[in-house]
Image (tube, rainbow, N blue to C red):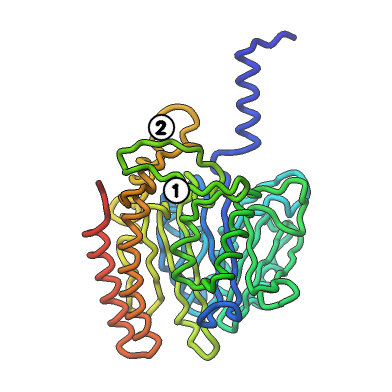
Amino acid sequence: MKISISKLFLLLTVSLCLAFPEGTSACTSFIVSGKATKDGRPLIFKNRDTGDVNNVVTDVQGEIYRYMGIAASWDKKPTDIWGGHNEAGFAIINTAAYNMNGCKDKDTSGDGRLMRRALEICRTLADFEHLLDTLPKPRDLNSNFGVLDSEGGCAYYETGDSGYVKFDANDPNVAPDGYLVRTNHGMTGCRDIDRGVERFMAITDFMAEAHRKGNLDCEYLIANTPRYLTHGLTKQNLYDQLPKDKDDTHFVHFSEFIPRYITSCAILVQGVAPGEQPSLTVSWTNIGWPCGSVAIPLMLQEGVSLPTIVQHGENGKSWLCSQSIAQKLKVFSLKRGNVRDYIDLSKLVNAAGTGIVQRVVPLEREVFSHARDAMKKVRKKKDGAQALREYYEWVDEYVKAHYPTD
């Protein structure tokens, strides 16, 4: 049977699309024991990569616990949660692993539902393990779950359809420096099909430097991890080739850095120190494309609504997420070719300091300053609810007024 070149090309294209679907999730993460952080509070972090780039922060009363979490803007219920924490101080994130169910690179659809359920009913790591143990098998899971609780627990669970392996960040034999990293493969899975290798190398380098310099701190990590512009494999640092200003167009190849075209948000959950109330857990949430968005620390407090700019707006989307996507499209400005693999670096960072990253970071620092004041009052139980309410209202006004839309 003869096949024309055009038909052969079509068949090849279709097969590649099936093998590597457009919406495939691929994230970058770390977990840090409270023994290794400056303030004794454990941390879990996720840079979310997904085809669902329109995300929101949702505040939900679950079956047992109230929780806040990341959801796709279209998922109003929500059915799936992609990182968050609950009022009992339990928090969870994930990265797709792909290799935990053999060497067939199997994708699954149960990760987001599991995280939503865990936030509804779990208080401790033991509760989460019980949930995993009692799920019907096969579980429809293929993921690295990062979990912390109010008792100081902090661990990864490499999880497949039929089993899981725990990696405890508090165990010096497992995490000698008090932290662990994961991207898109599990250490106990089929290593022949490891994915996210370049980002694994990047996050390994980044965390080693942060640890060496004493920067295992929530503010430093949420501000810098999702904007890390050094490639893990080539060690190319984009800050070494800065264009003159934002009009000095300079295209560079931009593939498999920690931030990517499909990066939709970042979240760092900060647990509580020994003796603190579980309700003092904080989600430092950067909703939207993190290079063009602003991380906002969020706490759950009875009677206090989250800032409107991170929630569903009138159009069903987050205002802040939408603004960051508009800026992202200026950075990924090619109209033809492999548009997702090249950026105009001048729009991202430049020597004049007018790139989008350089313009949103000062806003973020101001937000962090106000957040510290509000969280201090909440922790001291000094008009905490009112302080948090005023902080959220200020965030809505300040970020909208100062966000660089031009």
Residue that protrudes farthest toward the top in the picture: 2
- Residue 364 % position (x, y): 34, 64
Which residue is disc 2 drawn over?
334
From the viewer's perspective, tell me whether residue 368 is left or right of residue 87. left
- Residue 61 % position (x, y): 44, 72
Among the two numbered marks 2 and 1 on one chain, the one whose residue lies closer to the N terminus: 1
Crowd band around label 1 with a 10 angstrom C-alpha radius: few (<14), some (14–19), many (20+)? many
User: Quarter-wise, where is residue 313 in the image?
Assistant: bottom left
Residue occupying the point 56% across, 58% down: 112
- 321 above or below 372? above
Q: Are marks 2 and 1 in contact (CB under 8 Å)?
A: no
Tell me the quarter of the image containing the N terminus.
top right
Residue occupying the point 65% across, 71% down: 155
Residue occupying the point 28% across, 82% down: 386
Q: Nearer the viewer, residue 351 or 82?
A: 351
Residue occupying the point 52% across, 57% down: 47
Q: Amino acid at mark 1?
A: Val
Q: Nearer the viewer, residue 270 or 240?
A: 240
Which residue is disc 1 drawn over?
53
User: Quarter-wise, where is residue 255 in the image?
Assistant: top right
Camera sees residue 91 = no
Label 1 SS: loop
Q: Nearer the viewer, mark 2 or mark 1?
A: 2
- 90 above or below 2? below
Camera sees residue 93 = yes
From the viewer's perspective, tell me whether residue 160 is left or right of residue 207. right
- Residue 208 % position (x, y): 61, 65
Crowd band around label 2 with a 10 angstrom C-alpha radius: few (<14), some (14–19), many (20+)? some
- Residue 215 % position (x, y): 51, 71
CA gap, disc 2 to disc 1?
19 Å
- 177 above or below 376? above
Q: Nearer the viewer, residue 6 or 31?
A: 31
